[in-house]
Image (cartoon, rainbow, N blue to C red):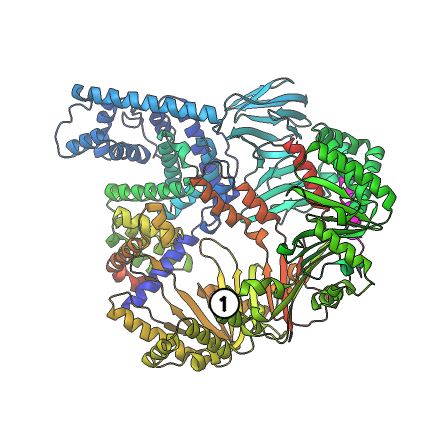
């Protein structure tokens, strides 16, 4: 039986729900808004808005015009004259509210109203003479302040710019300037002012040029306005289609806004089609960022996005077919798409290397090893492709001359590529960079090695390059040596270059080249490095095919460092046993694979041993396809983990374990057995849903004994609650509610000692898992996702990232899709920028938005942990294209 | 002939979609731009308070008229949405209070109307209509601050923290005011609870 209080709560819930569900017909709302805007526009353009508003008030009951309804507040006396009608409830609601509004905001008005209510005669509201000096001082100060602010804003050019923002280049049919009910025809050469609306007629079209050189082509029946503020231009599209050929933006961005999306660019060609059903944005060239609600999308040439499901996709070529430059745009789109595709294929075709003769020449003391592909051939191929395309395509040539050549970037790029090709074409497929330990012996510092295929030609190119570089700058000075034994260092900033047969070497110390000469003189395979385990690990990686490879002799690096680290910490972390770290990166099929192997001298120990062998992860089933971040891992024995942590804490701070034992005794629990032993060892932490206002975090932990765990949690919360009460602090407690077969638990939010509310949490048990989230709705959604069987792990964006290898399961994984939370980062950046003028949030937004979804997996084996990371970062082609454009913009 | 305002789909969305929109806009909007961006939100908030499209129209007009008088309206960039939201609620509540003064509508008469409605045979729709009327009237009888906070919390769906930020108060203070508001509502509406169930 429900209590009166419960009845009331239900009643209130129903009433609140009824209010929230009460929606007005959108058409009625729109018509009302139109009417209000009409009145506001009239009122604010005149001198007396009160009169305008009241006489236009369509909701005032029809009545003969009265003095009150025609009331004006042009002076204090006007206000006084309105008071009687106000007190007699004869004023229309909006006028009455304005009377109240004046009273709220002005002490003399308020006083006059109070006096009238009390029956006193409000005599005058004119300021007293005695106050005049103060008033004049205030006015003068205000004027000075306004002047100062205006001057500052003028100087900083960060306010709404007045004056012409664009000019009409051409117009087919009629182009109108809209000003209230007036329409004025615009001819080529006419200017478009800040915020002024222009509209093309039926079967018309126009091209306007913005002050920054950007061109906007309007289709028939299109209406736009141009706003410039704070150095940024916004083209507001009220309706219709436009194509924007954005000039490179030296600072800031160019925006195109509709009422359902915001498009931003730094220099590109794109189309926006905005109508009743929504907006469609299509990209012809460059990169475009589209913000729609919480979603941010990056579009590249040929890409298209619509803001409404009912707005179907159409080919980009069709979308721009109306343009007078449609043919050119279509051709450019095709050319750029083809170019990007061919660049991508070229880079993806970088040959894998299955061995490296340079490995044997590496110094025995090497602790860092980098094997890099010689991309000069690929870069050369891309340059040839570009030149061929430029020669064949007038459209592409025109774009290149306009966007790259004109800024001088083209010459710089060609010069850089020519020099790279000049040297690189004579080298082998790989360049190796190593760093050896032992700076005291003259062997420290980097050593660069490369095979040379045509030594004679390379020597000539090298000599010419060295001469040119030394002539340009003497820091560092390049020294070509012919006999390392005779080479000597005369200053610190020298780099020694040695061509020894078919091997080229560069070093910062002559001794490094002398040692290299000694190794080259030895019989193949007799060098001591080839006998080391580090060499063996690198050899293994090469055997599987390598493009980019980095090796770290962790044992050698950590050896000297570990002396400064407490032995307990080294043992606890498991670093004492670490041997090598090898990282590889390969491109192919639009996916970048990054792998790493951390190897150990024998079996893993310490914290690094907690990671279990790959095992199924049922907790991932509870994550929806909207998940933006997830980290999951499997540990062998949670109780042992707790025990090891306690042991370590006890070692570094003796007595910790006894304190804990006292705690356990006092609370009547055994953390290791009652808590850790009840857990199964699998845990997932995720952000699954909106990040604001409350982050949709969730924790899913495998539980072997839910009853025991819940009993322990109840006990802990109860005892902690008792302690808090004793200390006069807010009580925390677990609330329990059973709905159907499920029991939900929650710890309500409480205020901390400073009065701040500490968020509560909700949890439940489902199928052997403990689910914790900030709301019950999120718990239900997690279970629903699991029941539906279509969550993150079944989504394409996750499955496309799964690495191709022999493993069925993972020991741990981290999934990130930061692009989809770009908006949140943008908000944070905006908030930060509010305190830091000129702190651009765009860079952070851009970074987040362009971060591709990434999956990093870990596999625990007996003597190693293998990591694989896959990302849809694609090849370097988009990056190169972007660099070209940004280069043009910077120049 | 009226000057049409470009439709704004966001303007008719629920509070959950309100985040993010100010940050997407270059700052320093004019009255027209503020109106274009927020008129739907203001209208809907006012409608939830007043339950009348005509009143909501008056509130919309009042809010933007007030805004037009503000010399600092350009400084509203970052907080325009929340400022206008609050303004709509307060203007709506003002309107209800002024109507209460004018027509002397009180809960007793609502109770009578409710009884009549139940005799007619209340459908779910009419019951909801009565519930809305009762709650709106009761909320308007709360203190101005309590009514505003209650409306922001329950009608507009803001969290306590958001409201505290908007009003420059603490989350605890908001929680306390909400608790008192509910207590007051319970005291006033408890007699009617049975009639609507």
One can see residue A498 in this view: yes
Left or right: residue A671 versus residue A477 is left
Residue A199 position in % (x across, y down): 60, 27
Left or right: residue B132 versus residue A302 is left
Depth check, front residue: A777 or A562: A562
Depth check, front residue: A81 or A289: A289
Q: Does the magenta stretch include residue A338?
A: yes
Point 84% across, 51% down: residue: A502
Point 75% across, 29% down: residue: A401
Determine the main secondary structure of the stretch shown in magenta.
Answer: helix
Residue A253 position in % (x across, y down): 58, 35
What residue would you read off at disc 1? A699
Identify the secondary structure beneath mark 1.
Answer: strand
Residue A864 position in % (x across, y down): 65, 71
Residue A865 position in % (x across, y down): 63, 69
Left or right: residue A765 versus residue A187 is left
One can see residue A269 in this view: no
Establish if A615 lies above or below A424: below
Give the magenta part as a residue range.
A335-353
């Amino acid at each position: 039986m429900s209590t009166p209080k419960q009845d009331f709560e239900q009643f209130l819930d129903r009433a609140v729900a009824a209010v929230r569900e009460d929606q007005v017909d959108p058409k009625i709302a729109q018509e009302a808004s139109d009417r209000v805007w009409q009145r506001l526009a009239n009122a604010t353009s005149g001198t007396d808005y009160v009169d305008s508003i009241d006489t236009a008030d369509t909701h005032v009951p029809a009545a003969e015009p009265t003095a009150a309804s025609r009331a004006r507040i042009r002076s204090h006396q006007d206000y006084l004259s309105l008071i009687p009608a106000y007190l007699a409830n004869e004023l229309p609601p909006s006028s009455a509210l304005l009377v109240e509004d004046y009273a709220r905001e002005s002490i003399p008005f308020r006083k006059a109203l109070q006096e009238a209510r009390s029956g006193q005669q409000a005599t005058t509201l004119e300021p007293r003479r005695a106050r005049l000096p103060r008033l004049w001082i205030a006015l003068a100060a205000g004027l000075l302040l306004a002047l100062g602010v205006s001057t500052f804003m003028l100087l900083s050019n960060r306010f709404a710019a007045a004056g012409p923002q664009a000019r009409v280049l051409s117009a087919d049919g009629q182009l109108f300037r809209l000003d209230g009910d007036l329409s004025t025809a615009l001819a080529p050469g006419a200017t478009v002012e800040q915020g002024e609306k222009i509209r093309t007629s039926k079967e018309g079209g126009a091209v306007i040029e913005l002050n920054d050189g950007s061109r906007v082509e309007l289709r028939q029946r299109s209406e736009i306005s141009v706003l410039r503020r704070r150095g940024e231009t916004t083209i507001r599209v009220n309706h219709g289609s436009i194509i924007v050929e954005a000039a490179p933006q030296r600072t800031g961005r160019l925006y195109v806004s509709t009422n359902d999306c915001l498009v931003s660019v730094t220099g590109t060609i794109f189309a926006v089609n905005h109508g009743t059903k929504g907006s469609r944005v299509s990209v012809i060239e460059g990169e475009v960022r589209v913000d729609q609600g919480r979603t941010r999308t990056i579009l590249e040439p040929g890409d298209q996005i619509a803001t409404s499901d009912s707005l179907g996709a159409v080919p980009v070529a069709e979308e721009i077919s109306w343009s007078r430059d449609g043919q050119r745009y279509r051709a450019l789109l095709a050319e750029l798409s083809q170019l990007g595709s061919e660049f991508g294929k070229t880079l993806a075709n970088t040959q894998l290397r299955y061995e490296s003769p340079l490995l044997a020449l590496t110094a025995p003391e090497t602790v860092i090893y980098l094997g890099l592909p010689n991309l000069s051939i690929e870069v050369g191929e891309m340059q040839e492709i570009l030149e061929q395309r430029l020669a064949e395509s007038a459209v592409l040539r025109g774009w290149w001359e306009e966007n790259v050549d004109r800024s001088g970037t083209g010459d710089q790029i060609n010069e850089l590529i020519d020099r790279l090709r000049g040297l690189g074409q004579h080298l082998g497929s790989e360049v190796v960079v190593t760093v050896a330990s032992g700076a005291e012996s003259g062997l420290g510092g980097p050593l660069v090695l490369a095979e040379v295929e045509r030594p004679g030609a390379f020597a000539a190119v090298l000599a010419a390059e060295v001469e040119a570089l030394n002539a340009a700058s003497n820091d560092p000075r390049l020294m070509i040596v012919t006999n390392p034994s005779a080479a000597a260092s005369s200053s610190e900033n020298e780099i020694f270059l040695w061509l020894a047969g078919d091997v080229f070497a560069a070093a910062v110390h002559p001794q490094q080249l002398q040692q290299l000469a000694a190794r080259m003189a030895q019989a193949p395979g007799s060098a001591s490095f080839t006998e080391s385990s580090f060499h063996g690990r690198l050899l293994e990686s090469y055997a599987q095919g390598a493009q980019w490879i980095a090796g770290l002799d962790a044992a050698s690096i950590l050896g000297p460092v570990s002396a400064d680290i407490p032995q307990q910490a080294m043992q606890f972390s498991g670093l004492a046993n670490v041997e090598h770290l090898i990282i590889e990166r390969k491109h192919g099929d639009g996916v970048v694979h990054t792998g790493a192997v951390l190897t150990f001298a024998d079996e893993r120990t310490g914290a690094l041993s907690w990671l279990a062998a790959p095992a199924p992860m049922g907790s991932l089933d509870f994550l929806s396809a909207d998940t933006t971040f997830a980290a999951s891992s499997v540990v062998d024995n949670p109780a042992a983990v707790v025990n090891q942590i306690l042991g370590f804490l006890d070692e570094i701070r003796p007595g910790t374990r006894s304190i804990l034992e006292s705690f356990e005794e006092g609370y009547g629990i055994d953390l290791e057995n009652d808590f850790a032993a009840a857990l199964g060892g699998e845990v997932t932490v995720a952000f699954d849903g909106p990040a604001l206002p409350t982050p949709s975090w969730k924790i899913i932990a495998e539980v072997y004994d839910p009853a025991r765990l819940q009993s322990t949690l109840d006990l802990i919360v109860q005892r902690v609650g008792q302690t808090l009460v004793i200390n006069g602090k807010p009580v925390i407690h677990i609330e329990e509610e059973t709905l159907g077969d499920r029991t939900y638990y929650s710890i309500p939010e409480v205020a901390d000692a400073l009065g701040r509310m500490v968020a509560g949490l909700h949890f439940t048990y489902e199928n052997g898992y403990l689910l914790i989230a900030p709301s019950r709705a999120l718990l239900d959604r997690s279970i629903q996702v699991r029941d539906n069987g279509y969550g993150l792990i079944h989504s394409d964006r996750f499955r496309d990232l799964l690495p191709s290898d022999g493993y069925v399961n993972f020991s741990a994984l981290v999934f990130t899709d930061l692009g989809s939370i770009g908006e949140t980062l943008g908000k944070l950046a905006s908030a930060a920028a509010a305190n830091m003028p000129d702190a651009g949030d765009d860079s952070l937004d851009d970074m987040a938005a362009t971060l591709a979804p990434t999956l990093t997996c870990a596999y625990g084996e007996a003597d190693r942990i293998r990591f694989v990371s896959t990302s849809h970062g694609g090849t370097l082609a988009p990056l190169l294209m972007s660099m070209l454009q940004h280069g043009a913009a910077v120049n | 002939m009226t000057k049409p305002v470009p439709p704004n789909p966001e303007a008719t969305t629920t509070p959950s979609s309100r985040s993010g929109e100010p940050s997407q806009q270059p700052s320093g909007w004019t009255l027209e731009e503020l109106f274009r961006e927020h008129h739907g939100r203001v209208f809907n908030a006012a409608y939830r308070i007043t339950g009348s499209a005509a009143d909501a129209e008056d509130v919309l007009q009042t809010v933007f008229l007030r805004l037009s008088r503000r010399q600092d309206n350009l400084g509203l960039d970052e907080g325009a949405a929340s400022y206008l939201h609050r303004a709509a609620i307060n203007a709506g509540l003002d309107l209800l209070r002024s109507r209460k003064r004018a027509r002397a509508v009180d809960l007793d008469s609502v109770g009578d109307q409710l009884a009549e409605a139940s005799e007619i045979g209340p459908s779910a729709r009419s019951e909801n209509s009565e519930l809305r009327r009762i709650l709106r009237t009761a909320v308007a009888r709360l203190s101005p601050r309590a009514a505003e906070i209650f409306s922001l919390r329950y009608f507009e769906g803001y969290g306590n923290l958001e409201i505290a930020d908007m009003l420059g108060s603490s989350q605890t203070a908001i929680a306390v005011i909400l608790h008192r508001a509910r207590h007051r509502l319970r005291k006033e509406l408890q007699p009617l609870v049975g009639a609507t169930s």
